[in-house]
Amino acid sequence: MKHAKFTALALLSALAAGCSRHVQITSGAEYLARYDAQAEAHRQIGTTGTTGNDIATDRSTTRPDLDPAIRKAASVEPILQFPARFGIARVEGLDLTGIPAAEAALWQRLAESHAGLGTFVPVEPLVALATAGSLGVSRNRHSLAATVDTIRVGAARQHLDAVLIYAVGQRGDKSNTVLALMDITLIGGAFLPTRQIEIEGLARAMLLDVRNGYPYGIASASVDLSEYSTSFGSDARTADLRREAVLKVTEKLVPEIDALLTGLSTRLQAQH
């Protein structure tokens, strides 16, 4: 299959086949403390000039201080408590969009099944864009980082604790089958499967703390809607399949988010 450009999902992460999810509640302080302890041990070796085998150690080989950007990135803690206010933000391409009615119904059912965790509301694109503009956030609107920044400030303006950002899209191709020569006849073009339409729906989601950017979990899903078609009407059918793929992959993503929320709730409650 020749893959079309698929910016948002490619930038989010390499998509896993089928479905996957991962929950994170690790401590940034503990992560950095382990590094600092290891770095201090290496410094001590450099200071004494000996190893366990009494071989002199070059101080230049001791572990350097942690890169400030890495330290800053690691310095976050899971602070989410239940009940919480959750936002749902939809990204397509690199744009924050409204949630279509069919997808909104899926998320509404999810919210109802997790009512004990708190409330779930859409992140309103107009609020997010207006807030980002007024605060001077995301001047470069052609990047995923800018989109996420816009979502976070919009979610903060709506006083949300965490936001589920889900990116959806499709990629595909239309090619001839071995029957394509029959397109020269009226019957061949109208009734024979001379076109193979290959469409894949892709989705990736992350649950992010609005306040400190902590990533509580990620999930992904994909669907394959490839089929054969006549040449007559194949363009319209391809367009239909592209739209269908986005809805189908969202349907497949929702159970992964359901399991992610259940796992996150269980692990956070076990810590307290």
Image: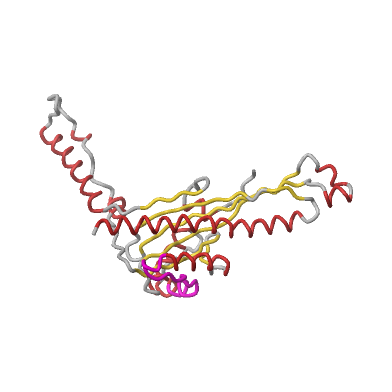
Could you tell whether 23 is left or right of 186 in the image?
Answer: left
Q: Quadrant of the C terminus?
A: bottom left
Residue 78 horizontal/vertical position (percent): 29, 59
Residue 244 horizontal/vertical position (percent): 63, 58
**Rendered view: 18 above or below 150:** above
**Rendered view: 20 above or below 98:** above
Using the image as rendered, state which of residue 196 and residue 63 is in the foreground. 196
Q: Quadrant of residue 121?
A: bottom left
- What segment is highlighted magenta in the picture? 114-131
What residue is rendered at 87% in x and 46% in y? 184
Q: Quadrant of residue 133?
A: bottom left
Using the image as rendered, state which of residue 244 and residue 181 is in the foreground. 244
Residue 175 horizontal/vertical position (percent): 72, 45
Q: Residue furthest left?
A: 48
Could you tell whether 54 is left or right of 178 in the image?
Answer: left
Using the image as rendered, state which of residue 112 and residue 191 is in the foreground. 112
Could you tell whether 55 is left or right of 236 in the image?
Answer: left
